[in-house]
Amino acid sequence: DRVTTIALARADKKNALTLAMYRALIAALEGAEADPQVRAVVITGTAECFTSGNDVGDFVAASRGGAAAGDLTAPLDFLRRLVTFTKPLVAGVAGVAIGIGTTLLLHCDLVYAAPNARFKTPFVDLALVPEGGSSVLLPALVGARRANEMLLQGVQLDAPTALAWGLINGIADDATAAAVAAAQRLATRAPGAMRASK
C-alpha cells in the first residue's frame, strides 16, 4: 500500500542503536525517499521496546579505533536525514523510547504509542546536552515548562501523559498497526500536496 516499514529489531539489547544500525536506518530512509512507489514510512520497534537509546559500548569501541570507527558520524547523519526527509514519517512506539528514541519522534509527522510506552530524555543525567534539535522541537510540541521537566529533570512520561502533553497522536493496543494504518491513509493523498504541506 505504498508504505515502507522500518523496524528496529535487536530485542536482546532492547533495540539499542549501534553505528551500523544508524547506517542501515539512513539507507532505508534514502531508499524510501528515492522510490516513487513509497509515499509514507513507518518506524517501529518490537512489542516490548522501541529503543533504549544508543549502544554506548559500540560507540566507545568505535572511538577507540574499533571496526566502526569510520561510522562515528552516523548518528548525526541520521538526524540530518530525518530533518530533510520529504515524505510522511509515522512512528509506532511500544515499551521504552529513551534518548534518541524520543528525539527521533520529534521529527515524525505522526506518533502512536502502545499503553506500555515510556518516553525519556536523560541527557543531563548523562552529563550530555539535548540532541537533534530537541531543545527547540520539544518545547514547540509540549510547551517550555513541560519540555524542561523532560530535558532538565529527565522526567519519564507514560503514554497517557505523552498524549495529554501532545507528544503523541494517540494510544493503541498495537501501536505499529495504528502507525501503518495512518501511513496508509497518508499514502492515498496527493504526494505533491503532502510534501508541500509537510
Image (cartoon, rainbow, N blue to C red):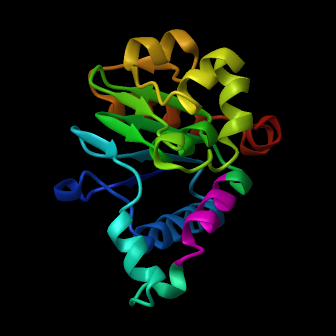
Quarter of the rendering containing residue 49: top left
Q: Does 62 sit left or right of 128 as displayed?
A: left
Residue drawn at the location 56% of the way across and 55% of the way down: 38
Say above or below: 186 vs 17: above
31 lies above or below 161: below
**Nearest to the observer: residue 178 or residue 165:** 165
Q: Indicate the position of residue 115 as horizontal and vertical percent values.
A: 29, 19
The one nearer the camera, 127 or 130, is 127
Is residue 75 on the magenta stretch? Answer: yes
Can residue 149 be seen here? yes
Residue 127 falls left or right of residue 160: right
| Residue at 66 percent of width and 15 percent of height | 145
Report the residue at 49% width, 37% height from top. 121
Dominant secondary structure, magenta: helix
173 sits left or right of 190 in the view: left
159, 195: nearer the viewer: 159
Is 160 rendered above or below residue 131?
above
Asked if the stretch drawn in magenta spans residue 25, the answer is no
User: In this image, 9 relative to 164: left or right?
Assistant: left
Quadrant location of the C terminus in the rendered image: top right
Which segment did they paint magenta? 72-82
Q: Position of residue 75 (x, y in %)?
A: 55, 65
The picture places residue 66, in percent across and down from the top left corner, at 39, 89
Percent x, y for residue 166? 58, 17
